[in-house]
Image: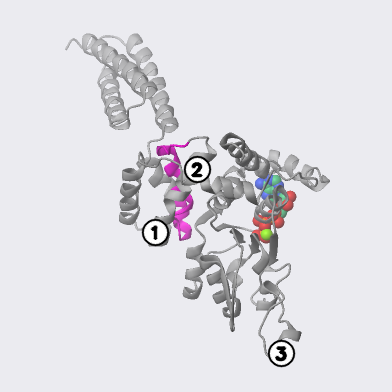
Amino acid sequence: MENNTDLISKARLLLKKLSEPFVGRDEEALVITLALITGEHAVLIGEPGTAKSALVRRAADLIQARFFKYLLTKFTEPSELFGPLDIGALRKGEYRRVTRGKLPEAEIAFLDEIFNSNSAVLNSLLSILQERVLYDGYTEIKVPLWSLISATNNIPDEPELEALYDRLLFRHYVKPVKDDQWDQLLDAAWEIEKGAYSKVEPVMNMNDIKALNELIFKVDLSGIRRQLLRLFMVLEEKGMHLTDRRKGKSLKAIAAHAILHGRMKATEDDLLVIKYIAPRDLEDFEKIDVILMEEIKTKDRILRELREIEANVKNFERLVESAREFDTRLIEYSKNLRRARSRIEVLTRNVEDEEIKNLAEQIIDNIERVLLLINYKLNL
Ligand SMILES: Nc1ncnc2c1ncn2[C@@H]1O[C@H](COP(=O)(O)OP(=O)(O)OP(=O)(O)O)[C@@H](O)[C@H]1O
Ligand SMILES: [Mg+2]
């Protein structure tokens, strides 16, 4: 049995290698990796040409497993996914499929344009995804499917596809790269076209993935449980309803995120994975960042905002120092500083991190000092 550190390094290596050829595809690599560790399914949604398929192809190269890849169209027949009927068996009155190399034998499946599923394939797909069983005519086959990763240009609006969409626990909207990265994109795509990444050594196999999956259930989740419940409430209030299936599976995702960060105890930062579980409609993918920003005070975010406030306070300090007595602008500065002080209080309420507490204290001391100076200059 391999030790946990080795396993975690492999998972981190997969994460790193997955996004390596691409510009700005770290989150997408994270979503795929989370799906694999949790044994869940994922969908990447986005406009054409955003490297969705390329990422998924790379994942297949980086993992040693039995794969099945297919591009679905509205006309895809069940036999294309599940294998053709066994004619010999049929003559003897047995209804059986030849499943070799098809979805029923795959451990990891990549289905492009999954919402093209027509009713002939949809029901079989639903039971494969949920129960890992293929019900097919008179037969029932247990399938080894671990994760299905899919890609699509559009979120389905047909009600019959709703059940399929809900089975894809991780959902991520892939945005085209921003204008300040177009330059990098040219270089990255050049390397890809040149074939610089065509030779890929696998970094892990199915055993590793399953061992990582077992680790999930050893993660201490006690510290984030109450906050997660609160987050569900907030999301519900903001009109982002998670089905019970998604709520129930979110702990697994949080634990997987902790593991990927080398922790066996989940922290507030791990709650950020809800970003990939809660959104349903297009606008949800926009809204979720704002909600999580407000609700999850991750250490990095608080520190970042505190440092911004610190810089602002220093600025005011200089302005106040150079201001003349009774300068009316001092009243405005004083208001701003008080506002900054309340913001720090809100930001650090219930926060126990020493680094944050020290920085907050230091800035507040500074604010008090500048406020005193203002009062002095205003002769108050
Ligand atoms: N962020 C990126 N960084 C580097 N190359 C990229 C990036 N986005 C796209 N490309 C290049 O564009 C190619 C096309 O991407 P791909 O076929 O994977 O897109 P897609 O999202 O699957 O599109 P579709 O929705 O049409 O199937 C990639 O193989 C890659 O060469
Ligand atoms: Mg594609």
- The numbered mark at residue 242 is 1
- The picture quadrant where one finds residue 116 is bottom right
Query: Any magenta on residue 284?
Result: yes
Mark 2 beta carbon near ligand 1 (under 8 Å): no
Whole-angstrom CA distance, mark 2 to mark 3, is 51 Å
Side (left or right) of 133 relative to 273: right
Q: Which region of the structure is painted magenta?
A: 264-286
Whole-angstrom CA distance, mark 3 to mark 1, is 48 Å
Of the four image quadrants, the one with ligand 2 is bottom right
- The numbered mark at residue 92 is 3
Q: How many marks?
A: 3
Whole-angstrom CA distance, mark 1 to mark 2, is 19 Å
Query: Can residue 243 be seen here?
Result: no
User: Percent x, y for residue 165?
Assistant: 50, 65
Q: Which residue is mark 2?
A: 257
Question: In which quadrant will I find the N terminus?
Answer: top right
Say which label, 2 or 3, has the lower sequence index: 3
Identify the main secondary structure in magenta. helix
